[in-house]
Amino acid sequence: MFYQFFKNILLLLLLTTSSLLVIPGFCHCQIPCGIYGDKHVFEEIKMDIETVEKSMKEIKKFSKDPEKNANQLVRWIVNKENHANNIMKTISEYFLAQRIKIPKDETNEKEMQTYSDKLQLLHAMIIAAMQSKQTTDLTKPATLKT
């Protein structure tokens, strides 16, 4: 019994580690081609948030009997991690790297405040996505919706 539990934990670690080696497909690059717009990116993030929430619910369900449901539990944990990572990657590589621009006139207080507000919002989203990886507390991904 202990051996099976230890084996399942080892499998979880192996799957989690191996999932980090897979390079996920991403529908846009860092070339400002204009093919993909913000609407499409917002839809991707929304889908990732919903998937993180669904994963958390499934993890809670399968955690009630971890020995019986070890494989499903591992799959949902990895799924949650991947989609939370997608959110962080999209925010970093699309919004921070491409969409949010430093104001040309840094003495313009209104423009600088808007810029600062956008950075704070994106940082809060990255934190919420990271916290979603660490828990099954549904309030974490819910903050991404607001």
Image (cartoon, grey):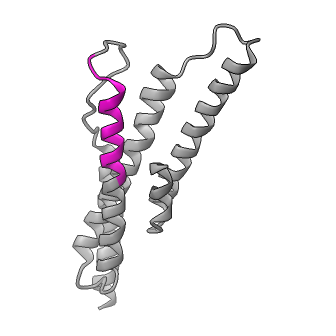
Disc tally is: 0
- Residue 88 in the image: x percent, y percent? 45, 41
**Quadrant into which the N terminus falls:** bottom left
- The image shows residue 55, relative to residue 63, as above or below, that is above
Identified at 58% across, 45% down, the residue is 124
> Would residue 116 appear left or right of 127 to someone viewing this image?
right
Q: Nearer the viewer, residue 33 or 15?
A: 33
Report the residue that reaches farthest toward the bottom: 1
User: Looking at this view, is 101 or 23 the one in front?
Assistant: 101
Q: Main secondary structure of the magenta part?
A: helix
Query: Does 88 sit above or below residue 54?
Result: above
Magenta stretch: includes residue 27: no
Is 133 situated left or right of 121 in this image? left
Give the image quarter of residue 30.
top left
Q: Is residue 38 magenta?
A: yes
What residue is drawn where x is 29% and y is 59%?
15
Residue 134 placement, left or right of 35:
right
Q: Position of residue 99 (x, y in %)?
A: 47, 21
Vertical placement of residue 111 versus 136, above or below: above
Give x and y (percent) for residue 42.
36, 36
| Residue 127, percent from left and from top | 56, 49
Q: Residue at image x 31%, y 82%?
A: 66
Range shown magenta: 35-49
Q: In screen coordinates, is 137 left or right of 9?
A: right
